[in-house]
Image (tube, rainbow, N blue to C red):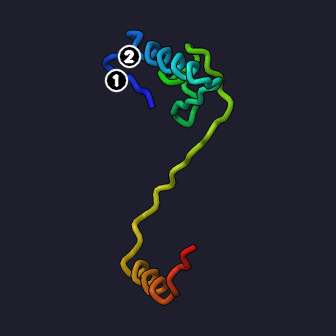
Amino acid sequence: ELTVHLKYRRLGIGHALYQHVTDRLRELGRQRVIGRTTEPLASADPPTPGRAFATAVGAEPVLEEHRHRLELPPASTDAWAMLRSQCSSRPPPTRW
């Protein structure tokens, strides 16, 4: 994973790192590099720094992954006690 600290972005450091890594990968016979960027759920306009960098080095999006988080209230003490009693009454899992 390559990341440039915010303070040092837009100085060519990310591009130099990318160039070094891709040159080395070519020497090793690799033909493809897979990377990822993280963006907010709503498409950012202007693009996020990660997407702007990926576009600048010629990367093309091929797969989008969406993750969602659901905030749940804490379980009650009674609910935890019930779960513990259910788990302790079951036989231990079989090891393969």
Horizontal and vertical percent position of residue 59: 61, 20
Horizontal and vertical percent position of residue 15: 47, 14
Residue shown at the point (41%, 71%) measured from the top left: 75
Q: Is residue 24 visible?
A: yes
Residue 41, numbered circle = none
What residue would you read off at disc 1?
5
Residue type indicated by callout 1? His
* Mark 1 surroundings within 10 Å by alpha-carbon count, few (fewer than 14), some (14 through 19), many (20 or more): few
Residue shown at the point (53%, 16%) measured from the top left: 23
Q: CA distance from mark 1 to mark 2?
A: 6 Å
**Closest to the observer, 21 or 45:** 21
Quarter of the rendering occupied by the C terminus = bottom right
Horizontal and vertical percent position of residue 38: 51, 33
Q: Residue furthest front?
A: 28
Residue 9, numbered circle = 2
Residue type indicated by callout 2? Arg
Residue shown at the point (50%, 14%) measured from the top left: 19
Horizontal and vertical percent position of residue 22: 54, 19
- Decide: is 71 above or below 37: below
**Closest to the observer, 67 or 60:** 60
Residue shown at the point (57%, 24%) measured from the top left: 28
Rendered image quadrant of residue 9 = top left
Where disc 2 sits, the SS reads loop
Q: Residue furthest left?
A: 7
**Closest to the observer, 59 or 24:** 24
In the displayed structure, does residue 13 sit left or right of residue 92? left
- Decide: is 42 above or below 90: above
